[in-house]
Amino acid sequence: MGLILGPVNGIDKEAIGTEEVVKRGTNQMLVRLPVTAASTVAVLIRRRIPAAYLLSTKSSMTSDSSGTAFTTIKEIVSLEKEIKKSKFIAIAGPISSEQSAQLFLSQVRDPRATHNCWAYKVGDQHRSSDDGEPSGTAGKPMLSAICSSGLDRVMVVVIRYFGGIKLGTGGLVRAYGGVTSDCLKTASTCLFKSKIHSFMQVQMGVEVTFDLLGVVYNQLQSCQAEDIKEDYDTGKDGTTMVSFKVDFDQVDKLEDAIKSNCKRDLVFFKNLAIGNQLG
């Protein structure tokens, strides 16, 4: 069993005595795997997600507003099996959309392999590919394994290096479905709640005349503003300062709505406030 932290790129293999060296990525990190006479060898390899991919995925995960909590995996994890001289390497990772699934596939697939089969699930959306294997023998059992795991926002790519012995339809289904299921079982998981409440809020204020208060309050309610207060000590007759907090992603929408409905070029005061409560 070995441990790899670094880029996930192509995979080269070469036998050296009684050990096998697996080169991964441009950094030429090595994992030595004992070669035995057994027909199946499983090796767990964990990888760190590239920083840019991790940030984009987390951002999309936490901004979900579908109203449904879901469980996904924390990091990229791999499981390798040798079945009748064919090498199967399952690589699972968290995703947030079809776009991030394509990015993940481009990072982990090996164009030199015989097949790069894959499947992913994002909410009600799911896709799979046999990548040249007989129809229904790879992608479909992989997707079935993902669905059976209870995980969401996850993709699995299974890289196969053909070893010269055909597995048959049933053998392929068991191989692809089995390595996918085993790979997901090794992954650490985390629960994402669907909406972040007050993750980042902005303290705002706007000075308005009394006749506009009704219009302002209607817009504040529609954008779920909080901590609404009025300060009449503005030094101007018939005018009040309305202060409130609103979620960061609602700021522009609320400001435009108030200006439009009040038909005034109002001046807003803003100050960032941070919170961390999951709703």
Image: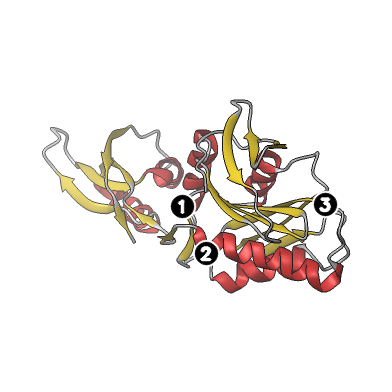
Q: Residue tagged by mark 3?
A: 162
Out of 37 and 260, give the one closest to the viewer.
37
Tag 1's secondary structure?
loop
Out of 151 and 108, give the one closest to the viewer.
108
The amino acid beneath tag 2 is Lys
For label 1, the crowd category at 10 Å Cα-Cα, with few meaning under 14, some 14 to 19 and many 20 or more, is: some
Q: Position of residue 136 (x, y in %)?
A: 83, 68
The amino acid beneath tag 1 is Lys
Q: Position of residue 64 (x, y in %)?
A: 49, 56
Disc 3 or disc 2, which is closer to the eye? 3
Residue 123 appears in view: no
| Res. 20 image quadrant | top right
| Res. 106 image quadrant | top right
| Residue contact between numbered discs 2 and 1, judged by CB atoms under 8 Å | no
How far apart are the alpha carbons under marks 3 and 2? 25 Å
| Res. 167 image quadrant | bottom right
Q: Position of residue 100 (x, y in %)?
A: 63, 46
| Residue contact between numbered discs 1 and 3, judged by CB atoms under 8 Å | no
Out of 207 and 169, give the one closest to the viewer.
169
From the image, which quarter does the C terminus lie in?
A: bottom left
Q: Is residue 71 above or below residue 271?
A: below
Q: Residue tagged by mark 1?
A: 74
Q: Which one is earlier in the sequence, the residue at label 2 or at label 1?
A: 1
Q: Position of residue 273 (x, y in %)?
A: 26, 40
Out of 36 and 121, give the one closest to the viewer.
36
The amino acid beneath tag 3 is Phe
